[in-house]
Image (cartoon, grey):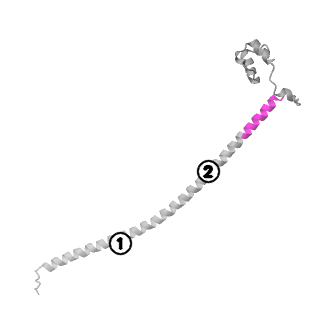
Amino acid sequence: MADIQSHPGSSSKVDRRLAAATQTIDELTAQVTALRARVEMLEGQVDTWKKRAAKHKSRVKKLKEGTGRAIADATEAAKKRAQVKAEKKVRQAIADHAVDDHPRAEPMALKDAPALPEASWNVTRLRAAAREQGVPRYSRMSKEQLLDALI
């Protein structure tokens, strides 16, 4: 075996290096401890933020449902207002056109009968009446011919 010779002053150099290494280890251990504490704190915050996110999602869902109901209610109310307005217009039109309290029934034979043409009618009106009654070749007839065919 070889003898390990010690150099004078080498033990103090080793002691200093050992002390420096021990100090570095202590500093690193303190930093690791601080980082672990920070990680635990942040993990706690993650749970808090997850709970808040779940609450906000629930609120958004409720707001969407409420909005849908509000839109449906508003649409239904608008339809009802439009219906009431239309009914009011119909009632007003009926009131405006009521001539007497006892309307007379029109005979069934005259109900769908076309109006009798007159000599004062123009050719366009006579042709329209001829078309309604199904007169053949009405478009080439003169006013007198149309009057004869329609009367």
Q: Between disc 2 and disc 1, whose residue precedes?
A: 1
Q: Residue furthest front?
A: 136
**Which stretch did the figure color magenta?**
83-99
| Residue occupying image coordinates x 77% and y 34% | 90
Magenta stretch encompasses residue 41: no
Q: Which mark is residue 51?
A: none
Mark 2 to mark 1: distance in Å? 53 Å
In percent of width and height, residue 21 lies at 23, 74
Q: Position of residue 127 (x, y in %)?
A: 73, 18
Q: Pointer 1: what residue?
A: 33
**For the residue marked with disc 1, what is the amino acid?**
Thr
Q: Nearer the viewer, mark 2 or mark 1?
A: 2
Residue at the image point whose x is 79% and y is 18% from the top: 150
- Which element carries disc 1, helix, strand or loop? helix
Residue 64 pos. (x, y %): 58, 53
Decide: few, some or many residues near mark 1? Use Cα within 10 Å; few <14, some 14-19, many ≥20.
few
Across and down, in percent, residue 136 comes to: 73, 20
CB under 8 Å between discs 2 and 1: no
Q: Which residue is mark 2?
A: 68
Q: From this viewpoint, which residue is outermost toward the bottom?
A: 1
Q: How many marks?
A: 2
Does residue 63 appear left or right of residue 100 in this picture? left
Image quadrant assignment for residue 83: top right
